[in-house]
Amino acid sequence: MDTIIPPSRIDSVVERELDALPIIDIHTHTYDPAFGPLLLWGPDELLTYHYLVAELFRARPDLPPSRFWEMPKTDQADLIWQELFRRRSPLSEACRGVLTVFQRLGFNPDADTLDPIRAWFRHQSPQTYVDAVFRLAHLQKVYMTNDPLDPVEREVWEKGFERDPRFEAVLRLDSALMHWPAAVPALRALGYDVEEALTGQTLAELRRYLSDWIERMTARYTAISLPPSFRYPNPDSALTLLYTRCVLPICRERQIPAALMIGVRKLANPALRLAGDSVGRSDIETVEALARDFPENRFWVTMLARENMHELAVAARKFANLVPFGCWWFLNNPSLIEEITAMRLELLGLSFVPQHSDARVLDQLIYKWDHSRRIIGRVLAAKYRDLASAGWPITAAAIRRDLATLLSRDPA
């Protein structure tokens, strides 16, 4: 029989078990090394990530965005390093993340210049660096974000490659479904006989496109990022029709989840490019209606507005086919992760996925999981202490089982 852990040791046991657990990251924008330039890594990519770009323009309101975009990437990275790390304390979570990466790789995070770090990276290959990142982040595998309508990515899939089993495929739907009929020329070029009007043939051909690429990629789920204005039912919306008449039937047929990421307002400030996206509160009744009207579909849902997260957890109590996941984008900050994780545990027990990295740069896997492990561990330890005070026996085996349920769970 496993030994009962006294309350004074719960924190240390949770931390030990978390550190030993190989995590499955269910949503990233990282790539198998076979995708070449689509796999972003290294200090310049890390420092010019859009979280830090947005912060730079807060620190330097006198800097025209157009001038920044004209600079070489190394100069952009140097400017961000000097402005956000050398001329002021790097207190934001995005800045702290860079320091965590550098520290875990063995560099001095207080360096005056990036030159020694860049010199080390020049001797790394994508494959060896992937190995190092997975080891440091203690990851079992990650889920990519894959778009067949991206010609660079599609060429890799069509040519074929020896896959790294640590990278699972996910069929991204944004370019095919959003702003219809914008995708019609690209789909027709691939041999799908679609037209602008949403005829029966067009819907059938789009379903064929989805099925073909799920098969080719062995995609484990479909994913789409949606604006706050997305509504279901909405008979006047091409997006809603395409999603319910094409995506959901194929997901049911293939027995894979449909992931919805709801709440992003694209290019609120276009001059900032990716850094110019913002957030809006979304309609929880849309999520409930989808879960109710399509009970044979499994929906994995995250929402971008903090206000929506409590509503989503309540909705998940009503619909077993609805799984909340992660703290996405603007919610990926320690104070909010802690709040949201505690709230979900209190409402849903273990029936959710507390975090995903959303990493676009490989290096981010290190800091996002380093930081999230600590936060999730604190919340869980407090809950286990509450159970112990209620007379429930807490054992290492139970903690290990619960952590695997939360953080080593496959969407498929």
Image: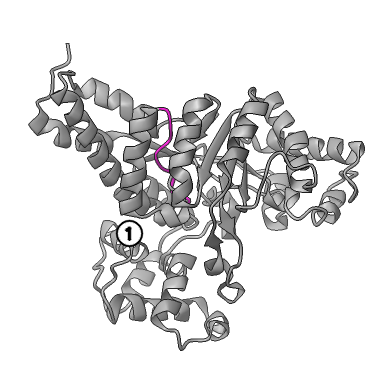
Q: Amino acid at mark 1?
A: Val
In the rendered image, the residue lying farthest to the bottom is: 62
Q: Position of residue 91 (x, y in %)?
A: 28, 68
Question: Is residue 318 in sight in this rendering?
Answer: yes
Which residue in the structure is indicated by mark 1?
101
Depth order, front residue of 188/296: 296
Q: What is the magenta range?
A: 351-358
Under tag 1, what secondary structure?
Answer: helix
Foreground pick, 152 / 339: 339
> Residue 125 at what x, y percent from top left?
46, 57
Task: Quadrant for residue 17, please give it.
Answer: top left
Residue 114: give x, y in percent of width and height: 34, 75
Q: Is residue 88 magenta?
A: no
Quadrant in the picture for the N terminus: top left
Q: Main secondary structure of the magenta part?
A: loop
Q: Is residue 352 magenta?
A: yes
Residue at screen point 44% across, 30% down: 409
